[in-house]
Image (spheres, rainbow, N blue to C red):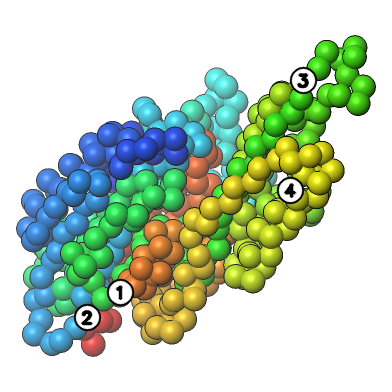
Amino acid sequence: MSNVVERFIRYVKIDTQSDPHSITHPSTAKQLDLARLLVDELNALGLRDVILDDYGCVMARLPANIDAPIPAIGFLAHMDTSPDLSGEHVNPQIVEHYDGGDIFLDEVHSIVLSPATFPELKKYTGQAIITTDGHTLLGADDKAGVAEIMAALDILTSHPEMKHGELCIGFTPDEEIGQGVKYFDIQRFGAQYAYTIDGGEVGSAEYETFNAAHAVLRVKGRNVHPGSAKDKMVNAALLAMEFNAMLPAVERPEHTSGYEGFYHLTSIKGSVEEAEARYIIRDHDRQKFEARKQQMQSIAAILNARYGDRLSLEITDTYYNMGEKIKPVMPIFEAATRAIQAVGLTPLVVPVRGGTDGSQLSFRGLPTPNIFTGGHNAHGRYEYIPVESMEKAVEVILKIIELSTL
């Protein structure tokens, strides 16, 4: 057995939460605490050219130990955790031989991880499961990926008889806020293609993501005493609500799955005088994605015509469906699915209902599909990961490397 669990427990106890409101890179200095630890560990394993750059990216290289001209393969994971829930004082718990029932994360506060709510838990009956204590996220997204890559490297460097081409290793900050590889030096990284270890359920592999944008709606109102407001007051908060009501209600995240896109209102605040609503826009299909953005602009135009240019809408693209760049080089993805099969799993190929660093990397010239970590329920207190799934991820990484030498 690899030391993946030991590494994972060590990494999740370091708070690396990113900050979407920061203007620094990385967005939080505490991400560098894990980055510096990884630099030390990579050096201890004997990797070459280990660096921590000015933007918080860690890179390293394991030279080939075979003479055949094999393309350099990259493996990446992100160090930060989501801003959605605290990543401070993470207290992981290991449930040995899970019995298929409720797991009490905190009995005092009745915080329960239950198969009644999360039925996929039943798949892991009899296995060891790592959970939170109910008060923070766990950080398997994506410290599981970090630990799995490091555990695979530990095995390779301990067994020089295992043949491999050149391996390029990268650990990035700020993936959770869409800034993870903005300053990632692909040329310095040196890989011809790569894999992010940042997926979910054991056996899953992805080459498609959403196209993504975020939108900020700002509304200017006119506040007048309500006793004399007739034909004078313009309530900015109500205008923001009217805008939202004109978006199709069935196209929200809670009503969509698979390849279905959505509009997601992530926050709203306001008063009579002014209001602001923030959205994310998602769709796998590029034309539908563009149509969604246009629909929001059209709604704003209708309301501006009705109320006198009181709404401004700013839409910014975040990333695009990496399938557009990976389909022309599908053998690199097929290598991953063959590796998953070779370790006794059935590949689960589904579109990512989100994005990974691979989205931006693929559009910047480094095709980068995504492979499972084994984690479930990311970004919240009910996050968990089976130990056996982590071990399988390590096996898959090693099998991809092995298959590349054949």
Dot 2: element = loop
Labels 3 and 1: the sequence-earlier one: 1
The reply, left or right, for residue 105 in relation to residue 96 is right
> In this figure, which residue is indicated by the disc labeled 4?
300
> In this figure, which residue is indicated by the disc labeled 1?
193
Crowding at mark 1 (Cα within 10 Å: few <14, some 14-19, many 20+): many
- Residue nearest the viewer, comparing 83 with 236: 236
Q: Amino acid type of disc 4? A: Ala
Q: CA distance from mark 3 to mark 2?
A: 65 Å
> In this figure, which residue is indicated by the disc labeled 3?
223
Residue at left offset 69%, top offset 60%: 294
- Does 391 sit above or below residue 128? below
> In this figure, which residue is indicated by the disc labeled 2?
71
Do residues under tags 2 and 1 come within 8 Å of each other at their CB atoms?
Answer: yes
Q: CA distance from mark 4 to mark 2?
A: 50 Å
Residue at left offset 53%, top offset 47%: 377
- Does 188 sit above or below residue 42? below
- Does 182 sit above or below residue 62? above
Q: Nearer the viewer, mark 3 or mark 2?
A: 3
Q: Amino acid type of disc 1? A: Tyr
Q: Quadrant of the C terminus?
A: bottom left
The reply, left or right, for residue 172 in relation to residue 320 is left
Labels 3 and 2: the sequence-earlier one: 2
Crowding at mark 2 (Cα within 10 Å: few <14, some 14-19, many 20+): some
**Quick check: can you spot residue 34?**
yes
Labels 4 and 2: the sequence-earlier one: 2
Labels 1 and 4: the sequence-earlier one: 1
Most extreme residue toward the right, as rendered? 230
